[in-house]
Image (tube, rainbow, N blue to C red):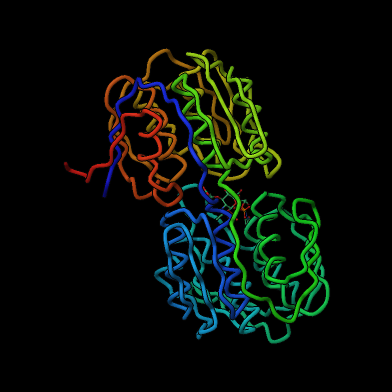
Amino acid sequence: MDEFVVRGGRRLEGSLQVDGAKNAVLPILAACVLTRETVHLHQVPLITDGENMGQILRTLGCSVVRDGSTVTVRADDLHTYEMPDRLSKQIRSSIFLLGPILSRFRRATVTYPGGCEIGLRPIDLHLTGLRALGVDIREEGGMIHCDGAKMHSGEVHFDYPSVGATENVMMASACLPGVTRIHNAAREPEISDLQGFLNAMGGCVRGAGGHTIEVEGRPALHGVEYTPMPDRIVAGTMLCAAAITGGEIDLKRAPVSSLTAIDAKLREMGCRIREEKHRVMLSAPRRLTAFSKLQTSPYPGFPTDMQVQMLALLTCARGTGVIVENVFENRFTHAGEMSRMGASILLSGRTAVVRGVETLWGAPVTARDLRGGAALILLGLKAAGETRVARADLVDRGYDAIEDKLSALGADIRRISSGE
Ligand code: EPZ
């Protein structure tokens, strides 16, 4: 397993172009199954979650070919509705394939995706949504067997605005005769991006970004060229890298409108931020000031995927800040690793109280998920001495060559094989 070796104390400075969004690319790759024609996706980051999703599509009979940052998918030879067990377990987002495969075959079998470090990750809302469309679902021995022979459009009501469940129902209903309405839908920008992709394929989806999404089924969808939106979490993470080092960064191709909650917190910490159409420029003070409180919630609230990066900023800011994690039940798993570096964090259930310290010390630490791994790298950029972040493979799930991007901004970071 690779690890990152970071030497702290460098001020980051420079510009960076933001790659395509992991959490837009994954459902969009699944949605390629809805057409027999060729789809070209541009600016697709080289991340393992995306590569694994591509592998699952190949196992189902699709052709998936990468040429630089363009990925071409052709699903005309899709020959099975059964998802491969091993790969499905590797990434949770294989559950996104339920809807599209049901749309193609009126049948689907998928492994029950396990939980992960940040929580149990149930899929009850996905299944509730599909049942509302007339899908008969049987769960047996860790497998989910879906029979969509009697599938129909209809009204879907979510108790919670689940991102994945909203996307699954959008894709399951895209070719169902009639109008499907999704109430209490997730409003994340990636949902709007999926709507844009489905409509570019000839679909008829309206309302994404709001509480109710309307899908008017179309008999067939056609091939398309599409560029998924830029990654707001990678963008936010890079803003934090500049912020924690008292540096400056100029983000190009930034998803400006979906960064407002993150920008607001960084301004509260003393950063100066200027925005242009597709650009965000940040300059940070030598030492940040703690915000008083941050609560995560579904979009347009503060994104849970940026919570641990903000926790990292608090550890060395002036003052004390509080973070409340409302989306996942176990998303403070990196507090212990940060304490090894001198952070002062008090945890109580879904609340973390962080008293900023003047100095953090480099130490050997271990990532337990991709966002926590990125946050430990942020601490390493600030800490005195050397920090080794083990499990680089977890960071690679959602960050494309993070060490190259940070090095280009002046960081002293390299990737080594463990044991070197
Ligand atoms: C998506 O996960 C993202 N992943 C996550 O990003 C992100 O943290 C999350 O949305 C919230 O924004 C992808 O898009 C691939 P949810 P998803 O369904 O769809 C509960 C990252 O780091 N829930 O909105 O799984 C669930 O347990 C990842 O890039 C149910 O109870 O998120 C959680 O508490 C991490 N039943 C909450 O809802 C369900 O059927 C939010 O989950 C589904 C979800």
Question: Is residue 318 shown left or right of residue 203?
Answer: left
Q: Quadrant of residue 171?
A: bottom right
Q: Does the rendering let one see residue 354?
A: yes
User: Seen from this angle, which residue lies furthest left?
Assistant: 420
At 63% from the left and 24% from the top, the residue drawn is 293
Q: Position of residue 296 (x, y in %)?
A: 63, 37
Residue depicted at 63% across the width and 26% down the height:
274
The total of numbered circles placed on residues is: 0
The quarter of the picture where the C terminus appears is: top left
Q: In x, y percent, where is residue 74?
A: 52, 76
Q: Is residue 238 above or below residue 188?
A: above
Looking at the image, which is closer to me, 36 or 276? 276
- Residue for point 58% across, 71% down: 32
Report the side of 195 relative to 53 (left or right): right
In this rendering, would 279 be left or right of 129?
A: left
Q: Position of residue 209 (x, y in %)?
A: 75, 51
Q: What x and y, as percent, mark residue 307?
A: 55, 36
Say if 98 sits above or below 115 in the image. Answer: below
Q: Can residue 166 be spotted in the picture?
A: no
Q: Is residue 390 left or right of residue 116?
A: left
User: Relative to residue 22, is residue 236 depicted above or below?
Assistant: above
Report the front residue among 216 and 359: 216
Q: What residue is at 27 percent from the left and 22 percent from the top?
A: 385
Task: Identify the image quadrant of residue 30.
Answer: bottom right
